[in-house]
Image: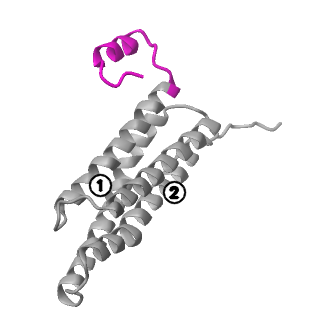
Amino acid sequence: MYLWNADALVEDFQHNNVSSAEEFKYFFVNTLYIAFISHMSLISLSDSNEIEWYDSVYLLITLLINAIGCYANYRLNQHGDDKDFIKRCLCLGVPLGIKLNTLAIILLFLLFLFIELAADSLKPRTIDFISYVGIIWPSTIVFYYFLARKLEAIAYYKTPTLETTT
C-alpha cells in the first residue's frame, strides 16, 4: 500500500496489480481519514478550539464505529459474490448518506435550537456529548446497517433462471 507515492499506485493500476483486498485497504484508510477530518472540523467549530481529553475519546469511538462498519460490510460482500465492493459502497453511499445526513442535520438543528431557547446553561462539553451519543454515532451506525442490507441484496442476489417443465 502506497501512502505517499501516487505514481507507483498508478503504475500498479495500469498493470492490473491492485487486488480487491488492496482496494479495500485504500477504502478503509480513506474512510477513517474522512471520519478523522470530520471530527477535527467539529472541534474547530466548537466554542473553544482546545482539544480536551473527551475529544480524543469521541475521536476514538468515531474511528472505531467507522472501522467496524467498513470491515463488517467488506466481509459481508466478500462472503457473497466478492465483487465490486468499492464501487458498490461509493455508489450506495451517496443516496444513503444524503438521507441520513439530512436527518442528522435536522436533528442537530433542533438540538441547537433547544439549547438556544431552553438550555442556555448547558456546558459545551454536555452539548458535544448529546450530539455524539444521540445523533452522530447512531446515524453512523444506521448508515452502515443500511449499507449492509443493500450490499447483501446485491452480493447474495441470484439471477432467476427459467426452468422449463415438459
Q: Quadrant of residue 164?
A: top right
Q: Quadrant of residue 81?
A: top right
Q: Amino acid at mark 2?
A: Tyr
Q: Amino acid at mark 1?
A: His
For mark 1, what is the residue? 39
Q: Position of residue 93 (x, y in %)?
A: 38, 48
Q: What span is in magenta?
A: 1-21
Q: CA distance from mark 1 to mark 2?
A: 21 Å
Query: Is 134 situated above or below 157?
Result: below
Instruction: Indicate the secondary structure of the residue bearing disc 1.
Output: helix
Q: Earlier in the sequence, mark 1 or mark 2?
A: 1
Residue 12 inside the magenta-drawn segment: yes
Tell me which residue sits at (44%, 35%) in the image.
86
Label 1: few (<14), some or many (≥20) within 10 Å? some
Query: Is 22 situated above or below 90?
Result: above
Q: Position of residue 58 (x, y in %)?
A: 38, 60
Tell me which residue sits at (40%, 55%) in the image.
62
Q: Quadrant of the N terminus?
A: top left
Q: Position of residue 41 (x, y in %)?
A: 22, 54
Q: Quadrant of residue 14?
A: top left
| CB-based contact (under 8 Å), mark 1 and mark 2 | no
Instruction: Indicate the secondary structure of the residue bearing disc 2.
Output: helix
Tell me which residue sits at (44%, 57%) in the image.
61
- Badge number at residue 145: 2
Tell me which residue sits at (17%, 60%) in the image.
49
Label 2: few (<14), some or many (≥20) within 10 Å? some
Residue found at the very far bottom of the displayed protein: 118
